[in-house]
Image: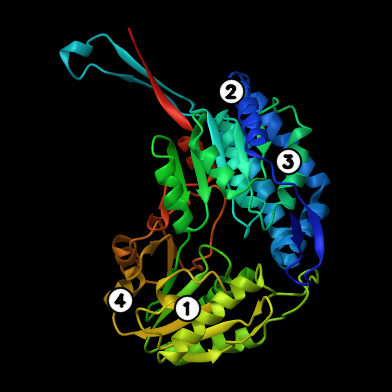
Amino acid sequence: MKIKNPFNNEVIGEITLENQEEVFDKVELAVKSKSKLKALSSGDKSKILNEIIEGIHSNFDALVKTIIQESGKPYRYAKGEVNRAIQTFTIASEECKRLPHDLFDIDATEKGRNLMGELQYVPKGVVFGISPFNFPLNLAVHKIAPAIAAGCPLILKPSSKTPLTMVLLSNIIKNTSLPEGGFELVHCSRETGNKLIEHDEIDVLSFTGSPGVGWKMKSMAAKKHTVLELGGNAGAILAKDANLELAIEELFVGGFAYSGQVCIHTQRIYVHASLFEDFKSAYLAKVEGLTIGDPMDEDTEFGVMIDEDNAKRVEEWVDEAISSGATCLIGGKREGALYAPTVLTNVAKGQKVRDEEVFGPVVILESFETLDDAIHEVNDCRWGLQAAIFTDSIQNRNKAFNELKVGALIHNKSTIFRVDDMPYGGVKDSGFGREGVRYAMLDFLDPKLLVRE
């Protein structure tokens, strides 16, 4: 299978899809490694994770270049992604030394007199991870690092759109002291991947991707522990007392980083009516000033989408909204895989660009009168990953936190805010379970109780 650069359509590499027998052979290797990984001390695991970090540092430029070439991600964001991968492995190298271990009395009833409970957390077994194209390195690392820290073998299937970054990382991992089978990379068809989900030796499924695919996989993995991160439709609220300058800067990046192909992309912005016109004019000026160009250029801020099909989908959704009465304030045009940064207003409920995850460079601006109205609008979709509120009022912040149906509320920062040690995940159709190294580790561990005197 040929891999193409979405910016210039040049072939940059190719991979060979493995058949079911070849993939199942890797499952066997992973199963054989379980006892070796379980026996690793925290020091052993920390050493392995630090060896990976050293390998990333040694291959830093190659990783950045590969991410840019296969995803079209601008240089500044690709470099940031490699740095985040280093941070994620660094966090894991410390968290593996802090596995939960609880000791407690169980004498609340007479039957437990003179007895204690000792609760340890043990590896669940083989993890099958599936990672998406938009962060081909760091979203895969958010499965790999916690699995190593938890002592679980991991089989990873990267996106077929961006597999080459993982080939590089796999080579780095293979040159560490991780036992054979502790990490296996597979390139296979969806059909073979589905067989892998159903395989009796797979204990955990960790999937990041679209809800249509994710929920179907959940049904296939009914008896397995499953973690799903299925995207979002993030809303941001600017209360009457919002710091306008701060909000404009934060939400500009939130709206257009990596052409909006981010699960927590700022898709909808609700601005108090008293601030709306000032916000709109300043925001549009920022959008108009975006530097669009070759993603290899360090000055480029905005570039192509992953492929022309996705750009066409965004174009169709925007055109549909405009035909139904929405106003296009800027953008709304496509050239190949490049969809112009676009801002809409007056978008009615029922339009895909409002209700679904656009996963593209489109932001909707609307005004509101009361905070209750804004909270209702943010909640009025099937997604619940992250939201943001800009306010200096603790009361406003707490009201939004208590009433918004999301996995996280970000205060005075963009919806796109994420650091790699925070719990990350959503509710509703955004999935369930949490990433963030420590929290992902808990999904890969089983509590095991010893009752003793």
Q: Pointer 2: residues within 10 angstroms few (<14), some, or many (20+)?
A: many
Identify which amino acid the numbered label 4 is placed on.
Answer: Leu
**Residues marked 4 and 1 touching at CB (< 8 Å):** no
**Residues marked 2 and 3 touching at CB (< 8 Å):** no
Upstream in sequence: badge 2 or badge 3? 2
Upstream in sequence: badge 4 or badge 3? 3
Residue of label 1? 243
Q: Is residue 249 above or below residue 155?
A: below
Looking at the rendered structure, the secondary structure element under dot 4 is helix
Upstream in sequence: badge 1 or badge 3? 3
Residue 371 is marked as 4
Give the colour scheme of this rendering: rainbow
Upstream in sequence: badge 4 or badge 1? 1
Identify which amino acid the numbered label 3 is placed on.
Answer: Ser
**Measured Cα–Cα span from mark 4 to mark 1:** 16 Å
Identify which amino acid the numbered label 1 is placed on.
Answer: Asn
Looking at the rendered structure, the secondary structure element under dot 3 is helix
Identify which amino acid the numbered label 2 is placed on.
Answer: Lys
Residue of label 3? 170
**Measured Cα–Cα span from mark 1 to mark 2:** 52 Å
Mark whose residue sits in front, 4 or 1? 4
**Measured Cα–Cα span from mark 1 to mark 3:** 45 Å
Residue of label 2? 34
**Residues marked 4 and 2 touching at CB (< 8 Å):** no
**Measured Cα–Cα span from mark 2 to mark 3:** 19 Å
Would residue 249 be seen by someone viewing this image from the given angle? no
Mark whose residue sits in front, 4 or 2? 2
Which quarter of the picture shows residue 112?
top left
